[in-house]
Amino acid sequence: MFRAAQELGLQTAAEVFADRNYNSDGTLVSRTKPDALLHDPSEAAERVLRMLREGKICAVDGSDVRVQAETICVHGDTPGAVEFVRTLRSALEKEGVMLRAPQRMTKE
């Protein structure tokens, strides 16, 4: 859908997930699996920093998956999500990551 939206000239933002594990094909690990979610915000911060700096994430099988990170998603329905986000944000800001809302393109 992301590529299709780009091809249509629509504004896009590539989203990565701070609180989810990835499969080697770049899909998210199913929530039916016990290793679907990350619960440690410090671990999540390290993973997000790598996504931002290197464009990679380590999949559950140990392989590296290329990702493009423009927005970071954390699922609000996960128990402890608010504290997870607070800790994640603090860790990212300590590493110099500027967090802000995606910018809208303006028509000229």
Image (cartoon, grey):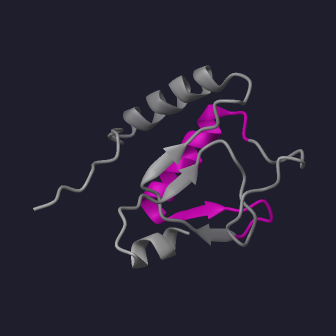
Residue at position x 16%, y 59% from top?
Answer: 107
Q: Position of residue 54 (x, y in %)?
A: 47, 64
Magenta segment boundaries in residue numbering: 38-63
Residue at position x 50%, y 46% from top?
Answer: 72
Q: Nearer the viewer, residue 35 or 43?
A: 35
- Residue 82 falls inside the magenta stretch: no
Total count of labels:
0
User: Is 103 left or right of 30, judged from the image as shown?
Assistant: left
- Farthest residue, direction bottom: 7
Quadrant containing the N terminus in the rendered view: bottom right
Q: Nearer the viewer, residue 70 or 53?
A: 70
Name the image quarter holding residue 25: bottom right
Q: Position of residue 3 (x, y in %)?
A: 49, 75
Q: Position of residue 39 (x, y in %)?
A: 73, 34
User: Is 104 left or right of 71, judged from the image as shown?
Assistant: left
Residue at position x 60%, y 20% from top?
Answer: 83
Q: Is residue 105 above or below residue 77?
A: below
Q: Is residue 73 above or below residue 8?
A: above
- Residue 54 falls inside the magenta stretch: yes
Q: Position of residue 18 (x, y in %)?
A: 60, 44
Quadrant containing the C terminus in the rendered view: bottom left
Residue at position x 44%, y 37% from top?
Answer: 92
User: Is 59 left or right of 65, judged from the image as shown?
Assistant: right
Q: Is residue 103 above or below residue 62?
A: above
Q: Is residue 33 above or below residue 91?
A: below
